[in-house]
Image (cartoon, grey):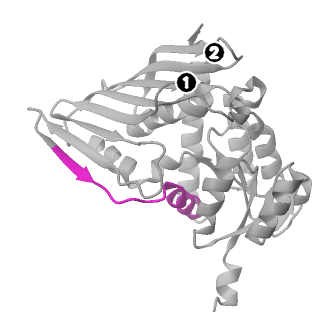
Amino acid sequence: MVSVTAMSNLKKIAVWGLGKHAINRIIPSLIKVSGLKLEGICSRNLNTVKEFKKKLNCYGWTNPEDMLKKKDLDIIFIATPIGLHAEQGKRVLLAGKHLWCEKPFTCNFLDSEELIKLSRVKNLVVAEGFMYLYHEQFKKICDIIRTNQIGNIKEVNLKFGFPRLENPGFRYDLYLGGGAFWDVGSYCISAALHLFENEIVNVKYANIKNSKDYKVDFDGTVILEFARGSTVICSWYIGVGYKNEIDIWGEDGSLYSDKIFSKIDGYNPKLRFRDKYGVETIDTLSSDNQFVQMFKKFLYMLKSNDEAEKERENIIRRARLMDYIATNCSKN
């Protein structure tokens, strides 16, 4: 039996947006996190709301204002198209709710900056949903770099791309924040920043290519140079064979790992090391749900002002670099 005290300590969360990602990944992961209670869902689609309200035994709203007015609701996770995040995020914060948001936070630096400032004024937590950051695979790779296990890093290659989607949703809609840069490139660029989190970064090259058939970009390449001499090459595509990987080249060895960003359930990541002579060893890691780990960390931010402020600073750093690339890259 669950005690009244335990129930009272639960943080109530609602999910705004019920696309496939929210239904298949976000909601099932939230339900698994101790300390969270899925209080409700919100979508313009009445039939979807009715279906999942019943399945999940929670509130269902088609009018966001009804959700925002609910006094005992603590957190709202935004899972809507990228182009809507800024306006919806502001409404969440003004309603006095903590804001957890699907990546990227917004598609404009000034919008992200406004939300960060508002979160500080309202003393509310904001968090950006780059789930891969919280998996043991990526955390271990960061530790390998920061403890110099393969020497000074000369070059990192980050690749993420997949075939064209049969049901792309907002991804082909310019006004909803579509395109590969925000949806796919953001993974590679955020990873580069996190690998070298305390270093100044310079954009050496940036090119974003627009699709011939749509008004959005389908691929891009960015080359980043960090203060201590490491070069990171980020490449992303829509309309290619699937790739999702990291390759790191150090002075004393190299490291490769597949499925660095997105993973199927039960996947056991492998870290493939080669020493300076090319001799390979493989470290197999345990499977884990990176969304569950992410939400556990977000929940901890509600208790730690230091962690909450660190997340604000990370969001701003990512938003600033993304905005700079979007504004200054060559386009064709």
Magenta-span inclusion, residue 122: no
Q: Quadrant of residue 253?
A: top left
Name the residue at 75% across, 45% down.
118
For the residues bearing labels 2 and 1, Cβ distance under 8 angstroms: yes
Inspect this view and state whether residue 145 appears: yes
In this rendering, position of residue 238 left or right of residue 113 = left
Name the residue at 19% across, 38% down.
150
Q: Quadrant of residue 200?
A: top left
Nearest to the observer: residue 117 or residue 43: 43
Nearest to the observer: residue 1 or residue 270: 270
Q: Which residue is mark 1?
A: 239
Name the residue at 86% across, 65% down.
70
- Residue numbers of the magenta segment: 281-300
In this rendering, position of residue 188 left or right of residue 232 = right
Q: Which residue is mark 2?
A: 211
Q: Residue lying farthest front?
A: 166
Q: Which amino acid type corresponds to the residue marked 2 in the rendered image?
A: Ser
Name the residue at 67% across, 87% down.
5
Q: Position of residue 259 (x, y in %)?
A: 41, 42
Secondary element type, mark 2: loop
Q: Position of residue 100 (x, y in %)?
A: 67, 52
